[in-house]
Image (cartoon, rainbow, N blue to C red):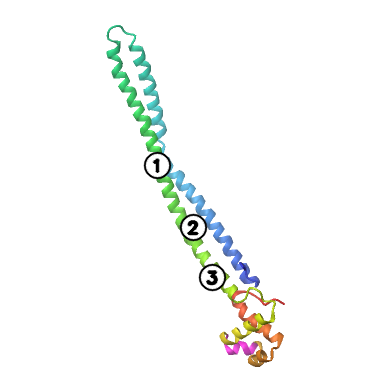
Amino acid sequence: MRWYADAPVRRTRQVAADLFVLGWVVVWVLVGRWVFGLVMTLAAPADPLRSAGTGLQTRMNDVAGRVTEIPLVGDDLQAPFTGAAGVGTDLVTAGDRLEGSVTTVAWLVSLLSAGTPILVVVLVWALLRLAWVRRARSLGGELDDPESVQLLALRALVRQHPRRLQRLVPDPVGAWTSGDPEALRALADLELAEVGLRARR
């Protein structure tokens, strides 16, 4: 299967298109990473929230443990501090949820912002390249045998403009009928030139 043309100009264009698509993908991947980092700045309050919750929880549990040592009323005084420690746990949970939600949004936004242009360009490139591959294959994968060259010459006689044929071969029909090898290869090359291929010599 051919992926590149034989003609230098067409092959250069194909390579340039490949490099462009590769560069396009790299640029948009970098843009996606930048967008992800930008959205993740919204999760900045999560760390202070978790830190405050952890600190409150630790301090309240410590105080709750100490007030139990107070005679008679220690157990009654423990409940408010234990409840305050639960508020610290809620703050830690809120921080985790905030970071998780922002991370989900960051992934979604970055994938949409980078994936859409990547998908569009890669799809167009793939369709054009596969169309060229199919056309090149239909014109003959192996052009070493004379029968293939003769069929391509006949295709050129049918499809190409008569003046263009006559500039190449004065009597194209007569050349094809007589089986002139040089004329047949010239006609085959004319047909293959449309996709940047050449008959094998």
> Can you tell which of label 1 and label 3 is closer to the viewer?
3
- The residue wearing badge 3 is 131
Label located before the other in sequence (3 or 2)? 2
Magenta span: predominant SS is helix
- The residue wearing badge 1 is 102
Task: Give the residue displayed 42% in from the left and 32% down from the top.
Answer: 47
Q: Which residues are magenta?
A: 160-167
Amino acid on which the number 1 mark rests in the picture: Val
Instruction: Relative to 30, say whether 68 is above or below.
Output: above
Instruction: Relative to 133, say whether 59 is above or below.
Output: above
Please say whether residue 151 is one of the residues in the magenta stretch.
no
- Image quadrant occupied by the N terminus: bottom right
Pinpoint residue 69: horizontal percent, then vertical percent: 34, 9
Pinpoint residue 161: horizontal percent, then vertical percent: 57, 87
Element on which disc 2 rests: helix
Among the 4 quarters of the image, the one containing residue 145: bottom right
Amino acid on which the number 2 mark rests in the picture: Ile
Element on which disc 3 rests: helix
Is residue 45 visible from the viewing direction of this image? no
Pinpoint residue 139: horizontal percent, then vertical percent: 60, 77
Among the 4 quarters of the image, the one containing residue 157: bottom right
Marks 1 and 2, how far apart in space?
24 Å
Instruction: Relative to 58, say whether 191 is above or below.
Output: below
> Can you tell which of label 3 and label 2 is closer to the viewer?
3
